[in-house]
Every structure is written in C-alpha cells, then in structure tokens.
Amino acid sequence: MNEINYLNTSDSCVAPVSISIHKSSKFIKDIDIIKTNCSNILSPLLNQIFNEDCIDGMKRIPDGTIDAIITDPPYGIAKKNPLKGSSHGKVQTISSEWDIFGSINEFQKFTSIWLKECHRVLKSNGSIAIWGDRRNIFFIQPLIEKLFPKFLDLFTWIKRDAPPNITRRGLAASTEFCLIYSKSETGWTFNHDDIKKYNNGKQMRNYIDIQRTMPANERTEHPTQKKIETQLLLVEMLSNKDNIVLDPFVGSGTTAVASKQLDRNYICFEKNKKYFEIALDRLRK
Ligand SMILES: C[S@@+](CC[C@H](N)C(=O)[O-])C[C@H]1O[C@@H](n2cnc3c(N)ncnc32)[C@H](O)[C@@H]1O
C-alpha cells in the first residue's frame, strides 16, 4: 500500500489529504480521497503571528496558497561590537544577534532556505517583496533570480533624516531597497490606481521619500522596525482585499498591522519572544 500525503486540488493549491492506494487492488473504490478545500486548511493559520522559526513554521502552509510575501529579513549587517556615537544625536549600529552571520556564504545559505519555502507557498501569480540594504541586496538578488522569473522592480526608500556616518570615512547610508519579483511572467497583482495616494495622487514612482523617524505612538523597542507607510504601500500594491499576505520575519508586526488595516489576511512568524509580544500588542490596538 502506498501512502500519499498531498493532493493537487487546483492548479495552485496542494492540500494535505490522506489517500490510501492498495497497489494490488483493482478497485478504484479503495482509494479514499478526503476532499479538502484550501481555505479550510489555511483558516487555523490566518491572521496569526507565530512565535517560532519561520523555516519550521512555513512547512505548515500548503503549496501555492499565499497571494503576496512582504518581508524584511535579517540583513546580515550587525556587528558584535557596534559603533556608538552622539555627535549628531543618538547613533547606534545594529548589534542584534539574529542579524549576525559568519560570512556572506552563511547569509546566502540561510536566505536560500527561507526563499525556497516562500517560493513553494506562493500562488503561481503571487509576488514577493524583500527589503535589504545597499550591499546585502546584491547577495539576495541572485538567489531570487534563480527561483522567481519576473523582476518587477527595485524599490528605494530615501531616508533624508538617516543618522550620519560617525566614522567620517564614508557616506551616510540613507537608503533601503526592496526587491520585488513575481512567480509568474504574467498575471501578477499590481494595484496601480490604489497606490497613487502614496505619491500625491500621481503615478507611484519606484521610490518613496519619507523620514525614518517615527511618531512616538508608532515607535516600538524593535531596533529595525519598518515604518507603517512602507508596508502599507507594498501590501496595497501587491495584494487585494481578503488576500493572504505572508511575512516570515515580522519583527514588531508592521506587515501584519498594515495587512489588518487594509483588510488583508496575514500569516506571520517571529522567533524572538519580546518582538512577538510587541507585535501582538500592536495588533490589539
Ligand atoms: C529586520 S527584522 C524585521 C523588522 C520588522 N519589519 C518590523 O517592522 O518590526 C527581522 C526579524 O526577523 C526575526 N528573525 C530572524 N530569524 C528568524 C527566523 N529564522 N524565523 C523567524 N523570525 C526570525 C528577528 O528576530 C527580527 O525581529
């Protein structure tokens, strides 16, 4: 007897089912197929943040069921002994342990693992948006290119109020970048008109020029919290109402908050307990 644990229920959804095939049996009626609807399988996961490693957690998501993935993963730029300074206000480089990788090779190995899971769970016409900085985005791009056929854009966040370069031996880093790809050459969601509001009613450019400083009622203790505007823009651009948005590295919950505000469903992961709790707190408000 063969045990098969997965069944294609549509072209874009593989639902876990139980099928028992008696090899020797001539009776088709021996095949017991439990029909399962994709949305039923996903409902226990919807609108939740899981306090766990995303690589384990994403395994519970069936193939081809997510509409958009919008994420801000570890950048691999943290330092064990970060620079500190106060010449132009408070400046501190990132020291978070979750962002430290031994080498570019290790960073790319980690990135490849979670990217493959993202590719598996994304619908055939779904899109993925991944944040990075001016260096690490080039380590991520070849890995995305291998999996996702359609480059949609490299979106830039210009942060005019970024802190100075306290070493005075280089330029002040004032940008972040978001690579956007689709799993399919055609048919991706792109809500052109809905996102004009992020550019004073005109066609949205492939950059946003907004301060990194957050109002006190938005700021949390997360060291790399994204501004709600950037995540609202990406969620609104790449998904529709009632769609499912996945963020495997949700931190303080910004993508989940944006999805909730825009009537999208979300599934998120965050392995750090403190940030997980901050995220839950933000969602309760
Ligand atoms: C760049 S931060 C995300 C910040 C988020 N955009 C926000 O607005 O708060 C990356 C997050 O990924 C989490 N993380 C790192 N590795 C993880 C993993 N394997 N699974 C789940 N979360 C992870 C870190 O704890 C961190 O909070």
Image: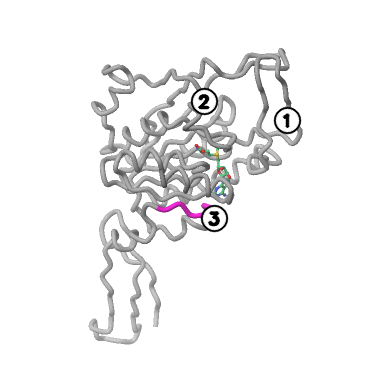
Q: Which residue is mark 3?
A: 52
Residue picked out by circle 1 = 82
In the displayed structure, 23 sits above or below 147; it is below
Residues shaded magenta: 48-55
**Drawn side of residue 273 relative to residue 245, left or right:** right
How far separated are the C-alphas under marks 3 and 1?
A: 27 Å
Corner quadrant of residue 20: bottom left
Q: Residue at x 26, y 18 (%)?
A: 201
Q: Is residue 211 above or below residue 150?
A: above
Q: Is residue 100 left or right of residue 257?
A: right
Q: CA distance from mark 3 to mark 2?
A: 26 Å
Q: Are marks 3 and 2 in contact (CB under 8 Å)?
A: no
Which image quarter is the C terminus in?
top left
Q: Quadrant of residue 191?
A: top left
Membership of 218 in magenta stretch: no
The kind of secondary structure element at disc 2 is strand
Figure colour scheme? one colour
Q: Residue at x 34, y 80 (%)?
A: 21
Looking at the picture, how far across and down is residue 17, in whole percent?
34, 71
Which mark is drawn over residue 176?
A: 2
Badge 3 or badge 1: first in the primary sequence = 3
Which three-letter amino acid code belongs to the residue tagged 3?
Glu
Residue type at the position of mark 2: Glu
